Image: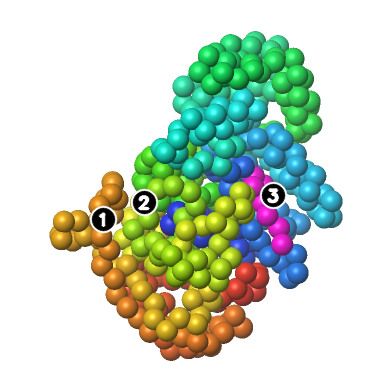
Amino acid sequence: MSAKLVVGTQWGDEGKAKIIDYLSGEIDYIVRYQGGANAGHTVKVKDETYIFHLIPSGILYPDAICVIGNGVVLDPTAFESELDSLKERGIDAFHRVMLSETCHIVLPLHRTIDEAREAQAAGKKIGTTKRGIGVSYGDKVTRIGLRLGDLLETGYLKERLGHILEIKNAEITRIHGLEKIEFNELYESLLAFGDRVRPIVKNTSFELNRALGRGKSVLLEGAQGTGLDIDFGTYPYVTSSNTTTGGAIAGSGISFQYLKDVIGICKAYVTRVGEGPFPTEIHGEAGEHLRKLGHEFGATTGRPRRCGWFDTELIRHAARVNGLTGIALTKLDVLSGYDEIQIGVAYKRNGERLDAFPGMLENVEVEYESMPGWKQDISAARSLSDLPAPCRAYIERLQELSGVPISFVSVGPGRDDTIVV
């Protein structure tokens, strides 16, 4: 059986959760492969709205198994809160979730350091969610992280946590001038969390490859987007993990031979939260107008998203890096009412067209192409023929510019507000 991947193609917030939810009805395993509780995935089913931060949104289907892979950094408090919130709404998710024994743990000290670093960054903030994600990944890379499996071995946990606190408390007290993290309270809380999740901690790489070998279906779910990838995004204004196809393989442990379909999610326009370059950004009242139309506020932080016109070079970059086989175009309905719609078709620097998405976006100018808009409400459309001619022309032009077939078109937030092309 083959695996499918849903990946963001812009700067996150593209509407991945809706497409994942749409696809998950026929999937056996849905896997989150990177990121942490800094992600916010919103799904609307009829009159109910669900926001997920760690657990894959496929949990809404009663037969689906949801996996948090080894590439994720797991915040115990956020995970337990999400489980409890789902249970309050009638969804007992615990025994339908598998946690990788090798995913790293986000500790309270990671959040403390994250907040302190951002506060001291003054005018050079990255714009993190202050949830300790980047600090946790940093500890993973420097080999002083704590993994979920460590919580299941009492003696090893005590020794490992003591070593970690010795190193991290030095930064907390000497550099940031804060109170040190006490060992006992943290140790006891980690033991308690380990005991609670012990039945669902697995070798998820083994479980997923075995399931694929037996003919089961797998859907890989990424957080954030290509423009925020630690290697291929707008560094340093990026997340701390590989959001792209390479990250899906490394963060889930499935064999690359199983991955056949890579669906890139992109908005019919572009948004970005936090700091960093944004070539097609719309400033002033026009940007605020698009923000209100699209309800563009972060699902995790509530921060207003910056809004801009569709960026062709960013999508071409995502297509190359991820090996996209199809695109799901979301929030097309938000553009209804515009007389004219702009598309960023090329980048220029010093008057010269650039061949591709550059490693640095500073001093980049955008060449635009204008297309007629449409006035009709398209939220009831269920086929391309239901859409007004200018809307269909816009879709066709985006497909032509990106070089990737558009497989799905979303015309509203609901599960059924989707056109399969």
Mark 2 residue crowding within 10 angstroms, few (<14) / some (14–19) / many (20+): some
Residue located at (75% from left, 39% from top): 80
User: Residue 363 in magenta?
Assistant: no
Identify the image quadrant of the N terminus.
bottom right
For the residues marked 3 and 2, what is the alpha-carbon distance in whole angstroms? 38 Å
Give, as a single range, the part of the protein colored magenta: 49-56
Apparent side of residue 266 relative to residue 51 in the rendered image (left or right): left
- Return the mark for residue 298: none
Quadrant of the rendered image containing residue 176: top right
Question: How far across and down, in percent of the image, does residue 386 sit?
Answer: 53, 88
Label 3: element kind: strand
Residue found 64% across the figure and 16% down from its top? 180
Residue under numbered circle 3 = 65
Check residue 277 in the rendering and tell me which mark sits there, or answer none: 2
Instruction: Locate residue 200 relative to residue 263 in the image: left or right.
Output: right
Q: CA distance from mark 1 to mark 2?
A: 9 Å
Determine crowd level at label 1: few under 14, some 14-19, many 20+ residues with C-alpha closer than 10 A: many
- Can residue 210 be seen here? The reply is no
Q: Amino acid at mark 3?
A: Ile
Whether tag 1 and tag 2 are in contact, CB under 8 A, the answer is: yes
| Residue under pointer 1 | 364
Upstream in sequence: badge 1 or badge 3: 3
| Residue 54: in magenta span | yes
Q: Residue at x 51, y 80 (%)?
A: 336
